Image (spheres, grey):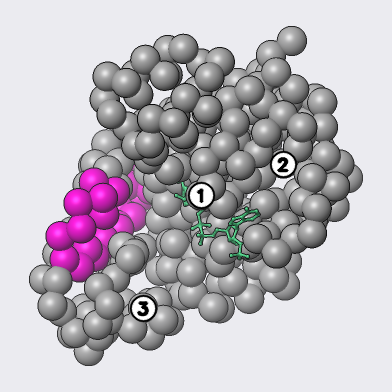
């Protein structure tokens, strides 16, 4: 039986409905949570991401500020912008879109963001809190994966979870969140010897590598829940034919458009897995939803209100 498809768009809409209620309640008590997005330069992909984040704020009634300093901004200039946003009372969340131009020291900038406004969860203080098992503001993509698992009724406690990928923004916080939820966690990376030995043991397998179709059916335990974080645009027809060999509609679309988005999980894994997130439409929609949720959470925490609500989880 093919895997149950875990539809991220439906879960995102459910979270948005809860957040809209929560934001309306906050606004009726005079609090309007606000997000400031800083986009340095004109990278087209980053422009699309930031526009979608601002659009989500507008849809939900969150305050929003969109700053677009030029591509030749210096570290000192960007630092001044971040400090100004740190000081503004109408700003609860600050997001500095990555990647930053090469002349800017990203580490200095990310560490300058007030940890209480660090809605991307990238500040070392927030990462440290997550390591300690006291999560505060946590990176949006792994947080979104947890929402998919929880809202889809996938048991996490005592599950064997394997995360493939160990980046600071996805793999590491993902492993920590799963451990925090009492899964037994293993992390694989590019130097792992025989990764299949680990992945085949996984009740929950999260792939976050950016390697299209890396995870094939033989890597997966029958019935496992497979979460595909990877998003890669492929343009090579041979690669597309290999990946979409049994997905005629997607191959057709690739031929029409000359490119397609592929996840880290081969589509044939749907024949083995018990549940699977699609790409696109799986984890992706949750990332912005959790950014909105973190902004609301930051607004509550800054005002000494209860941190958790249905849509702003721990
Ligand atoms: P990254 O910083 O490039 O990290 C990739 C990780 O994968 C590294 O830890 C690397 O290992 C590991 N890896 C690479 N090849 C491997 C292999 N053959 N076997 C096992 N591990 C391997 O990427 P990232 O920022 O974490 O993003 C990963 C993917 O998620 C990308 O496709 C990205 O576009 C996507 N993403 C999606 C969202 C979303 O909203 N849906 C958000 C963020 C990222 P080493 O550490 O040993 O090099």
Determine which quarter of the picture holds residue 273. top right
- Quadrant where the image shows the N terminus: top right
Residue holding disc 2: 205
Residue 185 in the image: x percent, y percent? Answer: 80, 54
Which type of secondary structure does the marked residue at label 3 adopt? helix
Distance (Cα) linking label 3 and label 1: 21 Å
- Disc number for residue 106: 3
Determine which quarter of the picture holds residue 215. top right
Residue closest to the eye, 26 or 269: 269
Residue holding disc 1: 210
Q: Which residues are magenta?
A: 24-49
- Disc number for residue 189: none
Residue closest to the eye, 31 or 290: 290
At horizontal 65% and vertical 67% (from top left) the residue drawn is: 130
- Quadrant where the image shows the C terminus: bottom right
Residue closest to the eye, 1 or 117: 1
Mark nearer the N terminus (2 vs 3): 3
At horizontal 25% and vertical 73% (from top left) the residue drawn is: 101
Q: Residues within 10 Å of mark 2 (few under 14, many from 20)?
A: many
């Amino acid at each position: 039986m093919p895997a149950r498809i875990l539809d991220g768009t439906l879960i995102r809409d459910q979270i948005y409905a809860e957040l809209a209620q929560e934001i309306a309640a906050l606004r009726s008590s005079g609090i309007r949570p606000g997000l400031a997005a800083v986009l340095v330069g004109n990278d087209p992909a980053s422009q699309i991401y930031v526009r979608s984040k601002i659009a989500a704020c507008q849809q939900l009634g969150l305050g929003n500020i969109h700053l677009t300093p030029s591509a030749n901004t210096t570290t000192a200039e960007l630092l001044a912008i971040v400090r100004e946003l740190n000081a503004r009372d109408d700003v609860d969340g600050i997001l500095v879109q990555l990647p930053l131009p090469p002349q800017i020291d990203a580490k200095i900038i990310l560490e300058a963001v007030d940890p209480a406004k660090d809605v991307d969860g990238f500040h070392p203080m927030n990462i440290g809190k997550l390591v300690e098992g006291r999560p505060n503001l946590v990176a949006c993509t792994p947080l979104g994966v947890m929402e998919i698992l929880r809202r889809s009724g996938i048991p996490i406690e005592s599950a064997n979870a394997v995360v493939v990928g160990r980046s600071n923004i996805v793999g590491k916080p993902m492993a920590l969140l799963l451990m925090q939820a009492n899964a037994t966690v293993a992390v694989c990376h590019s130097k792992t010897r025989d990764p299949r030995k680990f992945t085949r043991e996984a009740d929950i397998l999260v792939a976050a590598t950016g390697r299209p179709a890396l995870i094939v059916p033989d890597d997966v335990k029958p019935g496992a829940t497979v979460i595909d974080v990877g998003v890669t645009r492929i343009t090579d027809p041979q690669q597309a034919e290999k990946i979409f060999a049994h997905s005629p509609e997607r191959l057709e679309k690739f031929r029409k458009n000359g490119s397609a988005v592929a996840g880290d999980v081969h589509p044939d894994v749907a024949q083995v897995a018990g549940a699977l997130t699609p790409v696109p439409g799986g984890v992706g929609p949750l990332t912005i939803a959790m950014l909105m949720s973190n902004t609301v959470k930051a607004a509550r925490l800054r005002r000494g209100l209860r941190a958790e609500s249905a849509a702003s989880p721990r």
